[in-house]
């Protein structure tokens, strides 16, 4: 790690903003100075300027109950009104809000007036189902317009959404439904993925059937879950089972619902959504975000980091709404700013590997926000694919989710950005709610591979283990040292875990879980997670969660999971498994079949995103004398490196046993 970072830090290429870009740039250098004078006051100014407050706030930050913050506490607003109605009232109702592209090539367009009308109806549907302020609604949908409409309808009535990524299994969905005690699930029959319909409703049925008794027809009896109704959008047109006492078609309910709905104001600290993310234990954390502060930072960063000109830009974030990027930079940031955007249902390679570039050409996309994994995949496929399309509309590129290596950064700029577009590498997390570290286009001189500088209004430091800020040209742990508007307000139902996870490493400072290094100029380079959390294709996965899934398999006695470096996905899940002795059988012959079975087992339990890339059946695991698994050594093995220092192992023979095992 340290060798490669030293190589990276020798990266000398610098890209000054062009005079042309600078001349019309949205951001300006004085934002930094204004913000550092008085951070809370700066955010107050931004909030008043960027949002409509039904009742203006008189307070900004209250940190007296740290680490529990409030922002703009006595103000009242409606998040959906800010994203919709006010643009229509300002005369922009005919501006396109969403250009939706289905995977098979069908498309739908919504102006701001049309999207507002849809959300009003959907709000009435929710009210009709008895959903009100503070109630939780689980959303388990493909990337279709109804995902955006549902989220905004929930927000509009002061309810709380919990979007669960469609790639999660029935078990994972159920755990999230239970934790939040959701009363309603909004799903679809299915959606298009990789050239075919992938069913979603069966997973909802299975999730809700867990723990329910079956009647004589094999149908689940009264559910043991908190869910009263399931709203089903028709998209895949695949056959679905139907439970009339619980299931409702979205289109029927929408047709029957009234069109009028006036948005009511809610207090700034009203919960807006819960989004689950993996931590270092097996149980995902329900990250809680509230309304006024979150929307302020979402709108501010979306406008300044993407240099948004809402009248002319066409913005596309390729993220799914199931992740935080899909919340902040598909729904809330862009719509609060009145942007025109593209959303796409499918995978980048369906029906052909030029699909993304075709979409950019079709809609004249000017701002693209994507993950390094995707960029590296395209790099491997070769530039002849994007070169076949007209990408001249692009003027700004963004990157998020994992470090972008300088080589991929340069390729992104040269091949996708015609060698001229600025690239903003944006560091943030589900917990931070919005971007925290990024260059400002038109202001910052860009440096490939570094996320660079804290955004205006944020204080970020790199500390050593003792909590002392490291100087330039040194590494340590990344912390946020002052509260910020979009910060998480807690972990749903578990305030102690919130304090323990984020605020106990360095009292008074938020510890993000990432390692970082300052270069000679003081710019920040992210070095990846320092805890047992993996980052696969920009998605966070917990080693503990996958290990506990593996040991739930009847043939597994013990399991250790590591994130091994992977050229394309950043990290890949690699599992080491010890099989139960009484079940061992003839392992040599069976190992491949068992490995395949275990990969499927994990995918079934957690979701396809967690499926290990490799499973090694081994006789031993490397442990310290206190019984802690030494993942570092397993990582060495998985990455094909010389095994590092083994002196703290309880049994120093064990690594050679494992490596002979693996090679056999
Ligand atoms: C973790 C957060 C932020 C939305 C997507 C992921 C890593 C994120 C970067 C970046 C280096 C990055 C960090 C962070 N990460 N952006 N630009 N450079 N690393 O959200 O699932 O909450 O994961 O992703 O390790 O802690 P998430």
Image (cartoon, rainbow, N blue to C red):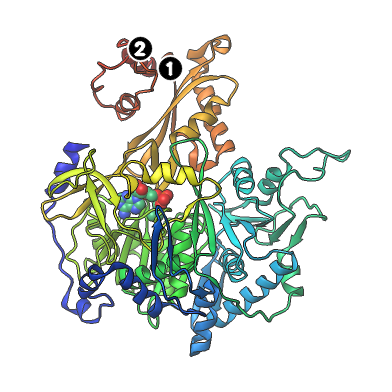
Residue 329 visible in rendering: no
Name the residue beneath numbered marker 2: 657
Q: Is residue 553 left or right of residue 461?
A: right
Query: Within the image, what quadrant is residue 233 found in?
Result: bottom right
Tag 1 residue: 618
Residue 254 placement: quadrant: bottom right
Q: Is residue 574 above or below residue 222?
A: above
Pinpoint residue 55: horizontal percent, then vertical percent.
Answer: 50, 79
Q: Looking at the image, which residue is at 50% across and 77% down?
A: 82
- Horizontal side of residue 558 vs 632, given as left or right: right
Residue at x 66% of width, y 71% of height: 123
Q: Secondary structure at mark 1?
A: loop
State yes or no: discs 2 and 1 in contact (Cβ < 8 Å). yes
Q: Is residue 563 left or right of residue 204?
A: left
Total numbered labels:
2
Q: Secondary structure at mark 2?
A: helix
- Tell me the quarter of the image containing the C terminus: top left
Quarter containing the N terminus: top left
Residue nearest the observer in this picture, 108 or 217: 217
Of residue 441 and residue 618, the one placed in the foreground of this image is 441
| Lower position in the chain sequence, tag 2 or tag 1 | 1
């Amino acid at each position: 790690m340290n060798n490669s970072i030293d190589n990276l830090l020798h990266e000398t290429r610098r890209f000054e903003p062009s005079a042309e870009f600078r001349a019309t740039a949205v951001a300006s250098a004085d934002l930094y100075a204004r913000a550092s004078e008085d951070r809370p006051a700066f955010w107050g100014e931004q909030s008043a300027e960027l949002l409509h407050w039904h009742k203006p706030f008189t307070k900004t930050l209250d940190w007296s109950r740290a680490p529990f913050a409030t922002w703009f506490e006595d103000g009242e607003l409606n998040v959906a009104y800010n994203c919709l109605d006010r643009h229509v009232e300002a005369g922009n109702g005919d501006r396109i809000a969403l250009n939706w592209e289905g995977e098979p090539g069908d498309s739908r367009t919504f102006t701001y007036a049309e999207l507002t009308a849809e959300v009003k109806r959907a709000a009435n549907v929710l009210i009709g189902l008895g959903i009100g302020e503070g109630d939780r609604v689980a959303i388990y949908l493909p990337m279709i317009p109804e995902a955006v409409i549902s989220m905004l309808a929930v927000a509009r009535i002061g309810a709380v959404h919990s979007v669960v990524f469609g790639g999660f299994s029935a078990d994972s969905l159920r755990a999230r439904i239970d934790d939040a005690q959701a009363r309603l699930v909004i799903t679809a029959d299915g959606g298009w993925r990789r050239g075919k319909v992938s069913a979603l409703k069966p997973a909802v049925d299975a999730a809700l059937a867990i723990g329910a008794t079956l009647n004589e027809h094999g149908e689940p009896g009264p559910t043991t879950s908190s869910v009263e109704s399931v709203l089903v959008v028709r998209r895949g047109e695949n056959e679905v089972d139907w439970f009339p006492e619980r299931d409702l078609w979205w289109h029927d309910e929408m047709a029957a619902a009234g069109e009028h709905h006036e948005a009511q104001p809610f207090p700034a600290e009203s919960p807006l959504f819960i989004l689950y993310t993996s931590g270092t234990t097996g149980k995902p954390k329900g990250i809680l975000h509230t309304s006024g502060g979150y929307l302020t930072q979402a709108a501010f960063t979306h406008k300044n980091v993407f240099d948004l000109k809402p009248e002319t830009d066409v913005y596309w974030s390729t993220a799914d709404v199931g992740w935080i990027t899909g919340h902040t930079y598909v729904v809330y940031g862009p719509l609060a700013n009145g942007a025109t955007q593209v959303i796409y249902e499918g995978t980048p390679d369906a029906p052909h590997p030029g699909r993304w570039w075709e979409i950019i050409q079709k809609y004249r996309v000017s701002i693209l926000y994507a993950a390094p994994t995707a960029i590296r995949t395209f790099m491997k496929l070769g530039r002849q694919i994007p070169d076949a399309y007209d990408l001249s509309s692009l003027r700004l590129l963004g990157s998020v989710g994992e470090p972008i290596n300088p080589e991929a950064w340069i390729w992104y700029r040269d091949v996708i950005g015609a060698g001229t577009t600025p690239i903003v590498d944006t560091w943030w997390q589900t917990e931070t709610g919005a971007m925290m570290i990024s260059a400002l286009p038109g202001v910052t001189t860009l440096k490939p591979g570094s996320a660079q500088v804290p955004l205006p209004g944020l204080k970020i430091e790199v500390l050593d283990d003792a909590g002392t800020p490291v100087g330039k040209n040194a590494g340590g742990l990344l912390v946020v040292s002052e509260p910020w508007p979009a910060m998480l307000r807690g972990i749903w139902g578990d305030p102690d875990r919130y304090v323990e996870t984020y605020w106990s490493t360095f009292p008074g400072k938020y510890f993000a879980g990432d390692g970082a290094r300052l270069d000679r100029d003081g710019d920040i380079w992210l070095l990846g997670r320092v805890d047992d959390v993996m980052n696969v294709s920009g998605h966070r996965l917990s080693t503990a969660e996958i290990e506990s899934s593996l040991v739930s398999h009847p043939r597994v006695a013990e399991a250790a999971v590591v994130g091994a470096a992977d050229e394309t996905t950043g990290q890949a899940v690699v599992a080491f498994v010890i099989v139960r002795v009484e079940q061992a059988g003839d392992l040599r012959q069976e190992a491949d079949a068992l490995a395949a079975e275990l990969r499927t087992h994990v995918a079934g339990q957690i979701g396809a995103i967690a499926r290990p890339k490799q499973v090694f059946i081994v006789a031993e695991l490397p442990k310290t004398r206190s019984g802690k698994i030494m993942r570092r050594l397993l990582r060495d093995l998985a990455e094909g490196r010389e095994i590092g220092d083994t002196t703290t192992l309880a049994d120093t023979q064990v690594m050679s046993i494992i490596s002979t095992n693996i090679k056999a």
